[in-house]
Image (tube, rainbow, N blue to C red):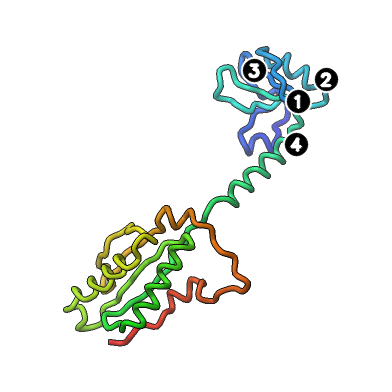
Amino acid sequence: MPPIDKRSAKSFIRTNERIRAREVRVIDENGEQLGVMPPFEALKMARERSLDLVEISPNAVPPVCKIQDYGKFLYEKDKSDRAARKKQKVITIKEVKFSVTVDEHDYQTKKNQAIRFLNEGDKVKASLRFKGRQMAHRDLGYKIINRLITDVGEAGTVEFMPRMEGTTLHAILAPSKKAESAPKKASAAPDKGHAPEAAANSSVAQA
């Protein structure tokens, strides 16, 4: 039994003598099809070229193997995986806090914050905490959150409708597909208002 290539074991990619199929379809280092043959024959061809035999499509019938430098193959695969991860959009949830006694100016400021966050591709948690006797006026809280949902318009869609958790009413808004596809404008200087804590630490009007 040949020594186990730790890199191959880690990524579950069979190479050289570890390829167990009865026959394989072989591609050479230049991308040319060499046909179907037993693995030992393909491996012999790879060794003659000082290269490896790498199983690149194990679920094909027969499995597809390529003659190539295995170290270079791993490097290119890692490079392509890293590039794919960079393209993935990381969605964060930014909180915008309201109170039952929020005034119009404060409401408009927080509504604009919510729209900006949604346009940047982030989700928004709109929360409203009831204090003491305010629990008797939960309808006012629902009215504020529902107004926000309406005012956000096409910038976002409701992921979770307003609901109570303890003494806090909250709803989750997600970016609309239109907002997600819109390219972000580069700014000359960082906007401090974009930081998640800017929303989380927004001043809440006292009851």
Q: Looking at the image, is mark 3 or mark 1 earlier in the sequence?
A: 3
Q: Considering the numbered disc 1 on the image, is that residue within a helix, a strand or a loop?
A: loop
Identified by mark 3, the residue type is Arg
Q: Nearer the viewer, residue 125 or 1?
A: 125
Quarter holding residue 41: top right
Label drawn at residue 25:
3
Q: Secondary structure at mark 3?
A: strand
Q: Which of the two labelled residues, at mark 2 and mark 4, occupies the earlier sequence position?
A: 2
Front disc: 3 or 1: 1
What's the CA distance linking mark 3 and mark 2? 18 Å
Label 1, on which residue?
30
Label 4 sits on residue: 71
| Up/down of 198 relative to 4, above or below | below
Quick check: 122 left or right of 38? Answer: left
Measured as percent of width and height from the top left, residue 106 is found at: 36, 81
| Relative depth, front residue between 148 and 73 | 148
Residue contact at pointers 2 and 4, CB within 8 angstroms = no
Residue displayed at 60% across by 26% down = 57
For marks 2 and 1, give the CA distance.
15 Å
- Contact between labelled residues 4 and 1, with CB atoms less than 8 Å apart: no
Where disc 4 sits, the SS reads helix
Q: Secondary structure at mark 2?
A: helix
Which one is earlier in the sequence, the residue at label 3 or at label 4? 3
Q: Nearer the viewer, mark 1 or mark 4?
A: 1
Residue at (36% x, 61% y) in the render = 173
